[in-house]
Amino acid sequence: MTSKVFVRFINENQWVGLCGKLAAGDPLEIPEDLFVEWSSADLDGRVSDSQIVPFNEFVEQLKSRWAHSYQYGISLIVSGANVFSSEVTIPSKQTRQIAQALPYMIEDQVAQDVSHFHLIMGERSAEGLVPVVGIPKQLIEGTRDLFSQHDLPLDSILPDMLSLPLRDGEWSLMFDGKHLLIKRSELDGLAIEMDAAPVVLASIMEHWQNKPQVLRVLFCLEHLNENVNNWIRTQISGQVADSEFEVEYDEINSNDFQLLCDHLHSHFGAKKPRFDLLQGRYASSGRRGPSGFNWKPLAAMVALFVVSYSVFLHTQAWKMNQEAEQLADSSKTLYKQLFPRDKRVVNVQRQMEQHIKEYQSGAQGQGFMALLALAGEQIHASNRADSSNISPRRVAYDDAQGDLKLDLLVKDFSQLEEFKGKLQQAQLGVETASATQDKEGVKARLKIRSERS
């Protein structure tokens, strides 16, 4: 966001009535005589002069000036006549308990069911006072729907009396043409109709606590003629005659809306005031502008990598499948050499284990078939771990000595010794009866016996 837009409804009561119809489910149609006053400012610039236009024209002007809604944010200033502020005493310091007790504490202060109001609260003071500001839910919901319907980025809804400038130790008072606005703290203020001003001012001076050191009266000269100016001075002087604070009058060469916008822009900038009514369930959602990073080259590189890696994985999978098929074929060939009577070979490992179990249980591991099965298992295991196969050539059994004579072909003498080591680990005694090397490899005869007890 680089710019702020400030706006208010000129005939706000008309808009409040439309929100009531909207809450009843009627379609929202903006009348041509619904006018707004608005101005704008860059975050590092000054506020422009305000202009009054129909709402539909206001929308068109925003669309023509800013192409995207993330480029600016809108603060709507609403009349204090449609908002109330108060302070309630709540003993608990727990935020959850304060929020639960708040509606019941202010129910006597509003003329309607408190459930019809959206409430925000400030921090609890040391004396247990909790400031609270409320606005009708149908007004805030209708306003949000209106701005959302036209894709307008509504960031804040601000009561006009709380948007007044305020100095420490002072109260601020301003006349906006219809109301007297009073602000005595960040979340406490009042909008008084002009006809009721004398009575309400008297009540305020009598009952409001923590009187200020200075009552600062802001005269926006565009709204005031000399008669109104003198009337306000007379009313204020009469009410504060016996008070201990001073009254200072500031004359400002602009209208009240311009004054509020200037203060909000200079004091808060892009920050949200604590008296913003868009909090809790009505909090505005942030908007993110498009990234300036050019992601297309990176996306192309990622896509190329994904394709290349996929091809690599498919190639590796194909090679592994080929090797697995070759290993399975060699295992099956070896099994048939060791057990020629087995015509149907389905699962080499399982059938080999079955032969071992049968022969171990039948001859206690010392018969011909038991030795052959154990030797065959080691040949099968070696061939699975090494691409160079150990090929059995001839098998004989010396029944008197209990030796299995195994003629085989291996790659070299180191492979022969490695195979003998595996047989010994399987609790078999091994002797090399003969071993010669030629162009085919090493041809050896091993004498194998069982060393199991």
Image (cartoon, grey):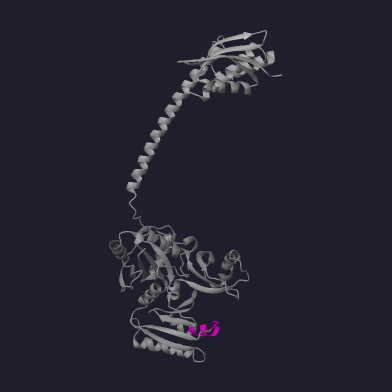
Task: Name the spot of residue 210 as percent of width and height, x first.
Answer: 55, 82
Residue range in magenta is: 201-210
- Residue at point 50%, 69% (across, down): 134
In which image quadrant can residue 335 be found? top right
- Residue at point 48%, 18% (across, down): 329
Task: Name the spot of residue 141 as percent of width and height, x first.
Answer: 44, 62
Query: Which quarter of the rendered picture does the C terminus lie within?
Result: top right
Tell whether 250 sits left or right of 335: left
Relative vertical location of residue 416 with respect to residue 401 in this rendering, above or below: below
36 in magenta: no
Task: Name the spot of residue 432 as percent of width and height, x first.
Answer: 59, 16
Relative vertical location of residue 287 with respect to residue 306 in this rendering, above or below: below
Query: Which quarter of the rendered picture does the N terminus lie within?
Result: bottom left
Task: Name the spot of residue 262 as percent of width and height, x first.
Answer: 37, 75
Q: Main secondary structure of the magenta part?
A: helix
Relative vertical location of residue 425 with respect to residue 250 in this rendering, above or below: above
